[in-house]
Amino acid sequence: MFGYVKVHTPSMRVREHELYRAAYCGLCRTMGKKTGQLSRFTLSYDLVFLAAVRILATGEIPEISHGRCMAHPLKKRAFVRPSSSLEYASCVSAILVKGKLRDNISDEGAVKRTLAYLASPAVSAMVKRASKHASHRTAELSVITEEKLAALAKLEKESCPSLDSTAEVFGELTGELFAAGLSGAEERICRLLGHTVGRFIYVCDAADDILEDKKKGRYNPILYLYGESATVTKANGTETCLSESVAESILTAALLDLDRAASAAELICDSALPETRDIAEIVRNILYMGMPEILRSILRRRCGMEESTPQ
């Protein structure tokens, strides 16, 4: 749904990458069964990360099968069989899509608002199907998500000048989504991990949208925090870019959040069962290499620098 939580593929071993793809395919299949076939179009790697963290926190052992699907009808592909963690991630996906649609209806232009209205019945059906899984506390999570997104929308409408304050609200939401249904040390670890990852996602999204937001006069916390110094005009006088000094400040702050997330993740990665050690390595790859590189890539583009080779 966000696209900022991915692996750094060149740093992965082959078996880890195959397991990562299998988890993605497994989540897609699980979404089709638990929240409806249309929900599969909302699949994202961010939710694969959530499922991986929940697998480590619960001690669940992934089971691999092979099969064909509509997207790959000619050749069988490996996929992780439906499990509690994948079912949970599919429910969270439906809840977040519903929240995003409400956001679009409230804030976006006429075209996006119309599309959001048209999609609302299908998304409501997704959440309704998800709510049948009582063990996942879907109804409670839906309420929490609505409250947190409403609090975030309020700050944004008030043009809150604090990037930290707005990122904190989104971090609180993702902390809840990572920790729901867990208890003890696992609950505390996943809450902190989800909280810091959520803050990072919010900062990435703000940095990614900054130039378009400035052009269209929309709220962006980076613009309000740094004012006119947030962007600079290139020598040609026509191209507006993110200031390199501001980009450096954003990167430093975001990497501090990721350091906290990685420290929390190590507590469940270090205790991973032999059968889930590759899952632990995938989580480490995302936190130590994938997410930092994604933010650096965004900042390079927004600063008008030459883009590196895509992952």
Image (tube, helix red, strand yellow):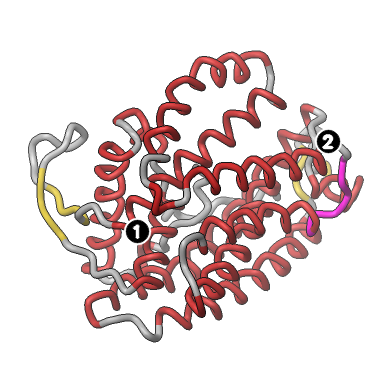
Residue at 32% across / 41% down in the picture? 31
Residue at 42% across / 63% down in the picture? 8
Q: Does the magenta stretch include residue 12?
A: no
Magenta stretch, residue numbers: 159-164
Q: Count residues near mark 1 (Cα–Cα under 10 Å), then give few for <14, some for 14-19, many for 20+.
A: many
Residue 85 circle label: 1
Residue 54's place in the image compared with 72, above or below, is below
Which amino acid type is shown beneath numbered disc 2? Lys
Left or right position of 267 against 104: left
Can you give x and y, in whole percent of width and height, for residue 255 in the image? 64, 70
Q: Is the magenta stretch mostly helix, strand or loop?
A: loop
Can you give x and y, in whole percent of width and height, for residue 76 in the image? 9, 46
Does the image show residue 267?
Answer: yes
Which amino acid type is shown beneath numbered disc 1? Ser
Residue 157 circle label: 2
The quadrant where residue 163 appears? bottom right
